[in-house]
Amino acid sequence: MILRLAWRNAWRNPRRTGILVVAVAVGIAGTLLTMALNYGMVFQMVETAIATELGHLQVHAPGFDANPELAVRLTDGGRKGLSTLDGLAGVRAVARRVRGEGLLSSPRASAGVRVIGIEPEREARITRIAASVTDGSYLDGVGRRVLVGEALAERLEVDVGDKVVLTVQDLAGELTGEALRIAGLFVTPSYELDTSTVYLRLDDGQSLLGLGGSVSEIVALADRRSRVPALRARLASELGDGAEVRSWDELQPVLVYLIEVFDQSALIVYGAVFVAMAFGIANVLLMTVYERTREIGIMRAVGFGRRALVATIVTESLLVTALGLGLGFAVALACVLWLGDGLDLSYFAEGLGRYGITSRIVPVLRSGDFTAPVGVAIVTAVLASAWPAWRAVRLRPAEAVRQT
Amino acid sequence: MASAAPLEPPPEGVEARDIAERAEEALRSERTFLAAEMTVISPRLTAPRVVAFENWDDRPGRRSFIRISAPAKDADTTFLKLHPNLWMYVPRVERTMRIPPSMMLQSWMGSDFTNDDLVKESSSLDDYDHHLLGVDPSPEGHEGLRAYVVEYVPHEDAAVVWGRIVTWIEVEHGTPLRQEFYDEGGERLRLMEFGEIEEVDGRYYPRSWTMRPLDKEGHETRIHVREVRFDAAIEDSVFTKRNLTKRR
Amino acid sequence: MAWRNVWRNPRRTALTVAATVFAVVLVMVAVAMGAGTHEKMIEDTVRVNAGHVQVSGPGYRAKRTLEQYLHFDDEVVRRLVRAEGAIGVAPRITSFGLLSQDSATRGVAVVGVDPLREGSVTTLPGRVREGRFLAPEGFREILLGGRLARILSAGVGDEVLLYSIAYSMESAYELFRVVGILKLPEATMDRSLAVISLGDAQEFFVYGDRVSEIAILADDSDSVPVLASAVQRAVGERPAEVHTWRESMPELEQLILLDDAGMYVMLAVLVVVVGFGILNTILMAVLERKREFGVVLALGLKPRAIFTIVYLESLLLALVGLVIGLAIALPLILYLQAHPIALAGDAVEAMELFGIEPQATWKLKPLNPLGSVLTILGVAIVAALYPAAKASRARPVEALRSL
């Protein structure tokens, strides 16, 4: 019955209530959309980092995290790691790599680089490097080939097909150099990568660095990011002391920090919006209380309890808020669907590029994003109704009835 | 290419590789000793810088030892090359250092030669294919001589950045006269000129070697060989790390 | 009459005013927080790199070798230090070298800094995790990046050999004593950075009074354009290049613009919500007084007059709210600007890792309060239109009937 009362009261003045509902809806929708875009950006950053180099999980020989030297290598060629990963459910792709550093030189210039030897086909299923090739090909062709970032090629004044010499200090400590032909150029969202990293085929890398059959790391991609912690745990326990297992968030903690910053600011923003709404709701409720002073008086005189009165007012508040929530959610969803492909921010492409974000941002709304507003809305509704309810309760039935 | 007159066609029965070998022989025997002065000219210097050094060379073993004798600040600094590695010893601070990859392309002793040049100079024959382009009747700087023009093209897997090196080698005695270093695009980036050719021990030897980078204005490094001894009696112990630290 | 009417229902008036006050304070604090955060972002970034403004020898940014230099004579120093808006001037020399300890040798990036001045521009002195920073009177002291020290097995107190080619083309080599180990967030730097004093660098590289670049920190990012001109004048006829952070790091500026855009969207949403609230309140007041308006209309008052009265009432309320809001917001912001709030949570660790102080900062930019006031005033002006219009359309007949 209280519900019916509350509903009737709410719609007593349709225009007034309507405006309030719209206000709440605007607040919710606006906030949800901005959050969705923000999350879209952060997700992209994370996904880009994962897809550019990190993968979801990496396996190294023990001590690699502290000391990423050539000598700290998987001497079994990654066999144990690979077979363990093959046996785990939820693993989409696995690849091996060797890592080293050296000097890449052309007739005109030279630059210090990181050298990564990859298994081209397997790597293509984990990272986007294959898709990032803008010129030439992806380590195809006969002979010793290297993939170089476009920015680096520019610095060295070389192009696809040109010869460069890579000089390294191999596992035995010997200085060794090798001529390589540039198979292709790549451009990734990471300028850092483009200017400092070159890719070889795994076997070429192994022979150049004197590693024999050893590899430096195994990288794996899971079906879904949410599965990663569980996979990491299982992998770590199965491989034991023989290997170090790291997940993407351990390899690049910055990303996690950014997600948290967004989460925190989201709460603050919601708070502000809801306080604003609270004012509106409280205002309207107060007005209704005054309007219905006489009615309230009669109700109380007739035996309508104080608690019931409060309940009515609170319910009214909740109803209006709920309507606003519903409308807001609907509008937000509609906008997200309408944006579809994503928001085009190519004006900011350069800046975003440095942080690994492409200029098309797809808004991301997760089911979890809806619960926060609902929770805050309920709290707001209740708080907003506090003062009006208190005022209503304070009305003395006798006086109230006499009011005109 | 630097030639006033067009090239004459290559004569029959002459192998490019043989000519290249002769050029090697003209400069080095199996064990060679030389004492030289290196003069570096650069717009940064108010006066040319002169470095005097001695060099013991083991060609087949690809080993080389250099001791700097002047200027005083650098005296007794030594370099040891055991292909492909390079070590250096600095006496004043008593430290031996192995030159890492990142330093290979840095200048050697402030000259236009790099550390890498020191290491690589022993590989001219095996890393290249040689083509005889013709005969130059009047090479630039040596107008009275005739020279074979041989093109050195590095093997696909040779760790050499150059696209090709064109060498003028005197027909009669096999002395190298000039070398032009090209990138793969055909642009000439470095020039090495040999001069002051004298007869020493049956070899016609250039006492002056001048390196000029063509992308930098006003830079030049000239090596003048004061003394050279072929088939010298050089002991193996010279080419050891111990020898790096031994004082004269 | 408008004023009298306003005070007819104090409670409702109070609520409306309160809503306006809330809006004003919120918007102003939020905008100031945005400005403060961005200022901090800029400062944090330039303090890791080379200040807000850099002066360097011609061609330095492209080549970064000893050949591109700038003469750092007393004249230049004096003028730069006195330049408007400069709070820190730090000269540096950057080059390449070989560092050797026992049998380990490593190519390093050598940076020569002025021990007294460096801290006024960059956060380098604060990054020493073991040992200490360079002493002003120190002789041949060196700092190593953390990973570099580990690779060389060098610790505080060890002597390492630095070898390079000086500007005079001579070989340069000296033993330096490690006095501190740095912790640098960027792995490449941590693995290859060696820092010595500017004086030692000038001697080592036979550089005379030359430097590679001078990094200048501004008191505020807004004063950078003026500072850049002052720096250009200070340099005078000397061959040099002057660059600002905007040119060196366009991506930072873009990110700030993007963030601003997002913030303004949110504020718009907020303001709309509050606007609706105000609208509602005034509307209710108007409707309540429908009878009154009817009577007045019947008595001959023109509808336009009613519109004006109601409209003025609303604006008055808004103005009162604005004034009170400003009175609260301005001191609050100024206080927050002087006393940033320390952050808590996991984010703190990550921030400190990057050498960023984990704080929330505020900044009052002169034009921002004006913008906020105008916006809210604008909303009030628009929001009051509808109720006022409604009031003027009250029907005298109906009004009289309900008497």
Image (spheres, coloured by chain):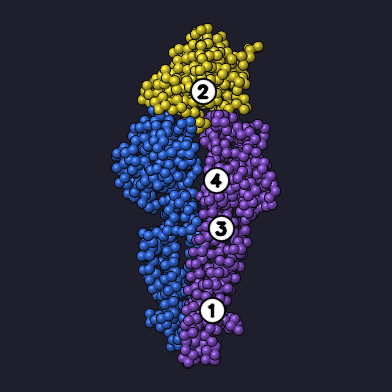
Is C374 drawn above or below residue A170 in the view shown? below
Q: Which residue is mark 3?
A: A39
State how far apart marks 3 and 2 are (Cα): 58 Å
Is A403 drawn above or below residue C238 in the view shown? below
The chain that hosts pointer 4 is A
Give the secondary structure at mark 2: strand
User: The N terminus of chain B lies in which quarter of the figure?
Assistant: top right
Label 4 CA crowd tier, 10 Å (few <14, some 14–19, many 20+): some
Picture disc at residue B81 = 2
The residue positioned 45% from the left and 58% from the top of the image is C343
| Outermost top residue | B202
Is A367 drawn above or below residue A92 in the view shown? below
Tell me, what hue is chain B?
Answer: yellow
Q: Position of residue A170 (x, y in %)?
A: 57, 32
Tell me the kind of residue under disc 3. Tyr
Q: Which residue is mark 4?
A: A190
Does the residue at mark 3 contact the one at mark 2 (Cβ under 8 Å)? no
Q: Which residue is mark 1?
A: A314
Tell me the kind of residue under disc 1. Val
Question: In the rendered image, what is the letter of the chain coloured blue?
Answer: C
The residue positioned 56% from the left and 15% from the top of the image is B24
State how far apart marks 1 and 3 are (Cα): 34 Å
Q: Position of residue B38 (x, y in %)?
A: 43, 19
Question: In the rendered image, what is the letter of the chain coloured purple?
Answer: A
Q: Position of residue A50 (x, y in %)?
A: 59, 49
